[in-house]
Each structure stands twice: as structure tokens, then as C-alpha cells.
Image (cartoon, helix red, strand yellow):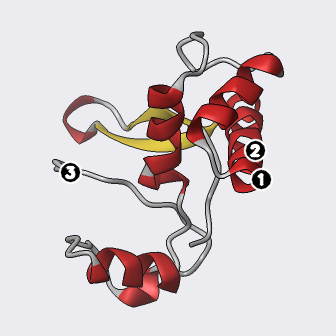
């Protein structure tokens, strides 16, 4: 699986005025958090250990987006978050093979966009 490693923030944009006013939201990259997530994946690919990854992240002075130290729980949450996964054929097949409900046609999984989970219970 290929990963789109990017921490994001939601930006809300309002267009028009009066009765014609509308708004939309989109994700915007945060460079300092992107660097943190990229490093976390680099360490995990080397160690293959959540506990070792958390320890190394703390030793290197990284913190979670809320400013806390890394532990196994927060490290696992970042690693399992589908928003860091590139929407490509591999991810599409993975979610289909694991009984995921995928919105959108396979042609939209073009390798340049990310994924977002909703109604997630597992």
C-alpha cells in the first residue's frame, strides 16, 4: 500500500453573499505535521515495532498534534489512519477485499488524492 503522508487541517471557504451564499470545506497540508508523520512512517518501516517507533519519535523531539509525547496508542492511531493512504488501485482493492464500503469509481483512485474514512466502527 502506498501512503499519502500528510497531516491536514480543515479550511472552510464561504462564497457569495445573501441568499446565494454557500460554503465548502477542504483539507490543507500543515508542513510541520507532515514532517512528523513522514518521520513516523520512516521509523516504523525500519523497526516494524509500534513501541520502538514511539520511543524513537520521542527521542527525536516529536510530539503528537495535540503536543503530547508519543506512546503505542497514539502511534498506532497515526499508522492506521486511512487519510495517509493514497487513493490508488492498491488501496481500492484493499478496502474492497476487506469488505469496506468505497465511495467513488475505481477511476477516481488515481494515485494523486488521499482517502477519508467515515461511519467507521472497526
Q: Residue at x 60, y 76 (%)?
A: 111
From the viewer's side, name the closer residue of 11 and 108.
108
Corner quadrant of residue 73: top left
Dots 1, 2 in contact, CB < 8 A: yes
Q: Nearer the viewer's eye, disc 2 or disc 3?
A: 2
Query: Pointer 2: residues within 10 angstroms few (<14), some, or many (20+)?
Result: some
Corner quadrant of residue 32: top right
Q: Earlier in the sequence, mark 2 or mark 3?
A: 2
Eyeballing the image, is 55 above or below 121? above
x then y, percent, for residue 112: 62, 71
Instruction: From the image, tell me which residue sits under label 1.
Output: 46
State the SS at label 1.
helix
State the SS at label 2.
helix
Instruction: From the image, tell me which residue sits under label 2.
Output: 43
Query: Pointer 1: residues within 10 angstroms few (<14), some, or many (20+)?
Result: few
Query: Pointer 3: residues within 10 angstroms few (<14), some, or many (20+)?
Result: few
Instruction: From the image, tell me which residue sits under label 3.
Output: 122
Q: Nearer the viewer's eye, disc 3 or disc 1?
A: 1
Amino acid at each position: 500500500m502506498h501512503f499519502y503522508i500528510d497531516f491536514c487541517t480543515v479550511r472552510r471557504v464561504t462564497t457569495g453573499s445573501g441568499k446565494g451564499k454557500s460554503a465548502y470545506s477542504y483539507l490543507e497540508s500543515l508542513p510541520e505535521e507532515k514532517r512528523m508523520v513522514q518521520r513516523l512512517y520512516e521509523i516504523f518501516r525500519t523497526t516494524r515495532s509500534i513501541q520502538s517507533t514511539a520511543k524513537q519519535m520521542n527521542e527525536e523531539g516529536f510530539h503528537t498534534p495535540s503536543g503530547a509525547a508519543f506512546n503505542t496508542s497514539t502511534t498506532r492511531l497515526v499508522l492506521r489512519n486511512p487519510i495517509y493512504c493514497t487513493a490508488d488501485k492498491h488501496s481500492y482493492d484493499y478496502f474492497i477485499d476487506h469488505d469496506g464500503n468505497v465511495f467513488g469509481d475505481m477511476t477516481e483512485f488515481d494515485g494523486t488524492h488521499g482517502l477519508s474514512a467515515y461511519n467507521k466502527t472497526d
